[in-house]
Image: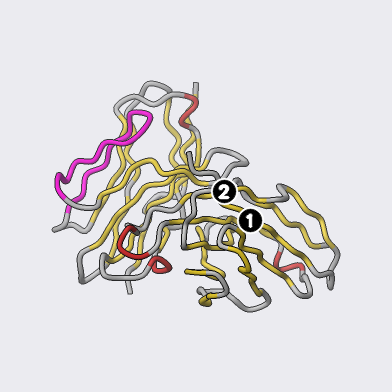
Amino acid sequence: AQSVTQLDSQVPVFEEAPVELRCNYSSSVSVYLFWYVQYPNQGLQLLLKYLSGSTLVKGINGFEAEFNKSQTSFHLRKPSVHISDTAEYFCAVRVRSGSARQLTFGSGTQLTVLP
Amino acid sequence: DVKVTQSSRYLVKRTGEKVFLECVQDMDHENMFWYRQDPGLGLRLIYFSYDVKMKEKGDIPEGYSVSREKKERFSLILESASTNQTSMYLCASSFGGGANTGELFFGEGSRLTVL
């Protein structure tokens, strides 16, 4: 079975600074990878996804992530954050041959952008 | 846009009460999910349904049941609510079969407090 580790539970950063949220996964087979964002008192929405092809994936709101197969990582980055990026971010993984119910979420990283 | 609607955003119930959480999606998705979200634990799958009247247990089904009588509607039932079921409950839906890549569409969540 696959698993996901989000290495930081809390990341405080000043406005306009760059940020990286780290995600590592374990799986012996090919995977799909996702980042979801949850704003306060809301459900999750998809930020970006890696299915195949280019390892650098661009998402909404200026975020991007890079799939690194050798390091089994899928870190999320943004070059300059805004106050409105304050939210909880979840990394998720599913094996390609698996069923829909086999999507595994990390424990989340709370990003707090400070003025 | 896909819309997943959860009927109640906030509920307060007493121990032993029967609780119904309703979820409706408007994208004709085959798959529907109920997750529970707790701080530091990420999202944990309670139940999954891949078709009308079809369901599979997730990782934490104890104390819960589900009903899917129509394709667009998926209900979560707590037969006898307990205080340890105080949590945020998230409904999600996705395409089924070959169209499924693991991307989920979430509702805004139902925050349940059991006193």
The type of residue carrying mark 2 is Val
Residue at 14% in and 48% down: A53
Magenta run includes residue A106:
no
- Examine the structure image and report whether residue A60 is included in the region drawn in magenta: yes
Task: Look at the image and name its color scheme.
Answer: secondary structure
Q: Which residues are magenta?
A: A53-68
**Which residue is disc 2 drawn over?**
B4
Give whichever of B23, A104 is nearer the camera.
B23
Task: For label 2, count other residues whose C-alpha is less than 10 Å away and answer few (under 14), some (14-19) or many (20+).
Answer: many
Sequence-wise, the earlier of marks 2 and 1 is 2
Q: Chain of mark 1?
A: B
CB-based contact (under 8 Å), mark 2 and mark 1: yes
* Residue B54 or residue A110, whichever sits in front: B54
Q: Secondary structure at mark 2?
A: strand
Q: Is residue A40 left or right of residue A66?
A: right
Relative to B75, is B63 above or below? below
Q: Is residue A13 above or below residue B70?
A: above
Res. B91 image quadrant: bottom right
Residue type, label 1: Cys
Residue B1 position, x and y percent, is: 48, 38
Q: Nearer the viewer, residue A4 or B22?
A: B22
Q: Residue at x 63, y 57 (%)?
A: B89
Q: Position of residue A16 (x, y in %)?
A: 37, 21
Q: Give the structural element (helix, strand or loop) at label 1.
A: strand
Residue at mark 1: B23
Distance from disc 2 to disc 1, alpha carbons, whole Å, reads 7 Å
Which label is found at residue A33? none
